[in-house]
Image: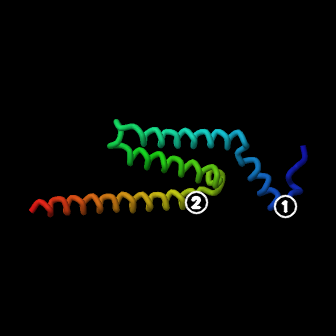
Amino acid sequence: MASHAHFSADQELQLEHRQHHPGNAEYVKIAIILAIITLAEVVIWYMESVKDLLVPALIIMSVAKFLIVVGYFMHLKFDNHFFSYVFFFGLGIAMMIFISLGFIFACHEAVTFFGDLT
């Protein structure tokens, strides 16, 4: 087996990237997982018994799919962890804004409802 000592730094980086890059079978597994989560989202939409949990369940499944896509298809799992932290920080900020807006609208509806009673 030949030594890697004669490769340039760029060639070494490309070789290391190829060794850590998932193969086609891994991508098929990820696609199947994403399809199953999507199927669960569609099924839960039509289930009357879980209407109270619909929004939280869809949010959790969407976040799971986001993390899978970012982790594998954007190769963050194989890159420097700093990039993962940047994406997780952005996701955390987005979720805080989403929850805050939901709280604001819920409080506004409650105030409007009780204001109409007087």
The C terminus lies in quadrant: bottom left
Q: Secondary structure at mark 1?
A: loop
Up-down relation of residue 96 to residue 51 (above or below): below
The colour scheme applied to this rendered structure is rainbow
Separation of marks 1 and 2 at Cα, in angstroms: 25 Å
Determine whether, in the image, residue 48 is placed left or right of residue 14: left
The N terminus lies in quadrant: top right
Residue at 14% in and 62% down: 116
Residue at 79% in and 52% down: 15
Q: Position of residue 26 (x, y in %)?
A: 68, 41
- Name the residue tied to disc 2: 82
Residue in the foreground of this view, choosing between 5 and 92: 92
Q: Quadrant of residue 24?
A: top right
- Name the residue tied to disc 1: 8
Q: Position of residue 83 (x, y in %)?
A: 59, 60
Whether pointer 1 and pointer 2 mark residues with C-beta atoms closer than 8 Å, the reply is no
**Which mark is on residue 85?**
none
Q: Mark 2 Cα within 10 Å, few/some/many (few <14, many 20+)?
A: few
Q: Secondary structure at mark 2?
A: helix
Say which amino acid is labelled 1.
Ser
Residue in the foreground of this view, choosing between 10 and 100: 100
Q: Position of residue 42 (x, y in %)?
A: 48, 42
Residue at 80% in and 61% down: 10
